[in-house]
Image (spheres, helix red, strand yellow):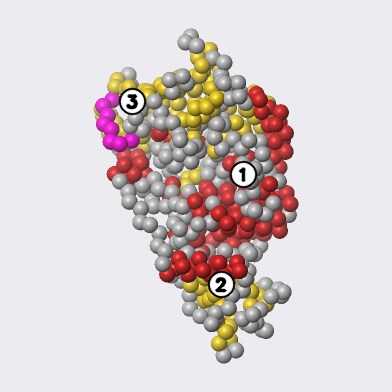
Amino acid sequence: MKSFLSLSIILFVAVSFRVHSQVKAPIPVFTRSDSLRGELTPLRTCYDINYYHLDVKVNIDDRFISGSNEFKFTATTDFKLLQFDLFANLKIERIMYKGKELPYTREFNAVFVTFPTVINKGKKDSFRVFYSGYPIVAKNAPWDGGFVFSKDASGKPFVATACQGVGASIWWPTKDHQSDEVDSMAISISVPNGLKDVSNGRLRATKKLKDGYTRYDWFVANSINNYDVAINIADYAHFSDQYQGEKGMLSLDYWVLPENLTNAKIQFGENVKPMLEAFEHWFGPYPFYEDGYKLVEAPHLGMEHQSAVAYGNGYKNGYKGRDLSGTGWGLKWDFIIVHESGHEWFGNNITAKDIADMWIHESFTNYSESLFVESRYGKQAGLEYVHGTRGGIDNVEPILGTYGVNNEGSGDMYEKGGNMLNMIRTIINDDQKWLQILRGLNKTFYHQTVTYKQIVDYINKESGKNLTTVFDQYLQHVNIPVLEVRFENGKILCRWIADVKGFDMTVKVRIKGGQYQFIQPGTTFTAIDLPGATKENFEADSFNFYIGILIE
């Protein structure tokens, strides 16, 4: 007969064994369109993007856009044919190269361009795509992609873009793959007179045009991933501040609807500088001093648009006024400001090469919430917060997506991923080393795109521990590992029940009320030394370790 340690452990065991014995993750089905969008083929790797100039006019009344994007690139191999991406509902007017139109073909949302002669490896070259059309209108931004057309309290237009996941090519022509971030970018957005556009980077110029429009010219000095490029249009009010950070004076700019100016000054004032202080401590300097930091009110909940973070949380603490952890700690700060700004380090500074590895963005950023709480209210508060988020874990599909088909994994990349990172911190058992690992990740992979292996290898090397099986179990499989404990002939035997071959995670155990000690079972039973332990008083640290426990 089995005995269990607590109600929470009963639930862990029930879920874990149900998954192990019955539930399998659904097998996804992919199409040719998915491969064209997600695969890194020679038609994409043949050129490295150096610079874009995106120039777009937004006709708000007709919900119509028109304009162009200039591609400046360096050839990485000899080629005559390349692929860029633009959704099929948008019309290509022409593609210009050295004053002449280039022939092209389209398949789904991919565009294949043929050059008149071979472009040799190492050559720097450019072409320009002119396009127009009615962009897809998002039904539930930011969770689906497209334009959002809304109005402010006075009835004036309030418009924005959000395109994570579906991809930037839903509204502008680009090499739509996360592996190749453009080195710098000009963004020119023309809007009806009386409105303003706020995009990424710094505003270089504003020009009144002859047709009743005003063009706003922004420039991004740092590398930027495609889905971060954003349009925000409204009759914005603007105020600013500064933050003395690790790399000097950081400009803080805030663009909000006029009716929210008073609330914005209070809410942003209470949250932004404490957030920056916490994250510069844990992750290193804000990665985009050259482009500044902006919060921009948006007609959707929020997005991590680099140097122009979209904000739509209603000037409330929590997540739309709720505490996702259920602990009370989440109501002491504005979730969207903290979470979306955390992506400036994980997602924007460090970007996953393939969307299948979006856990690199979301797991670390979910965990950053706990670190923010810790910085403000102490370590125990941070631990309580991350533990409390477990209520959002489903354990139905793996966190890791499928490579090469633009497929991100399950939403468990947030809460389950954050709890995984807290476990890894607990295993390392050296907070100073953990701090240096987090800062080191942002320094080593500064403004880079990365893979699963690079992140895991770095943490392994810097921690001095082989944590590969831990990452593999929590990211690649639905089930959480179960610590099976047997009391036989005066011995205590432990092993892990897990999907990963050779799984051998360190865990903390104790006699109730005593001091925890570390053990490192494998997948075969191993005797442990815990004098005085019985079925009734044996306890594993299920507060810091997201595991199942089975005692026999």
Q: Read off the residue under disc 2.
A: 549
- Mark 1 Cα within 10 Å, few/some/many (few <14, many 20+)? some
Which residue is depicted at the point 71% across and 46% down?
332
User: Which residues fall within the magenta stretch?
Assistant: 102-109
Q: Residue at x 39, y 36 (%)?
A: 175
Distance of label 1 from label 3 (alpha carbons): 39 Å
Q: Which amino acid does label 2 sit on?
A: Ile
List x then y, in percent, for residue 347.
53, 44
Tell me what residue is drawn at x 46 percent, y 61 percent.
478
In this rendered view, identify the residue nearer to me: 252 or 438. Answer: 252
Per the image, the residue denoted by label 1 is 319
Quarter of the image for the C terminus: give it: bottom right
Can residue 463 be found in the magenta stretch?
A: no
Q: What element carries label 3?
A: strand
Which residue position is annotated with label 3?
A: 91
Give, as a three-letter code, the residue at label 3: Lys
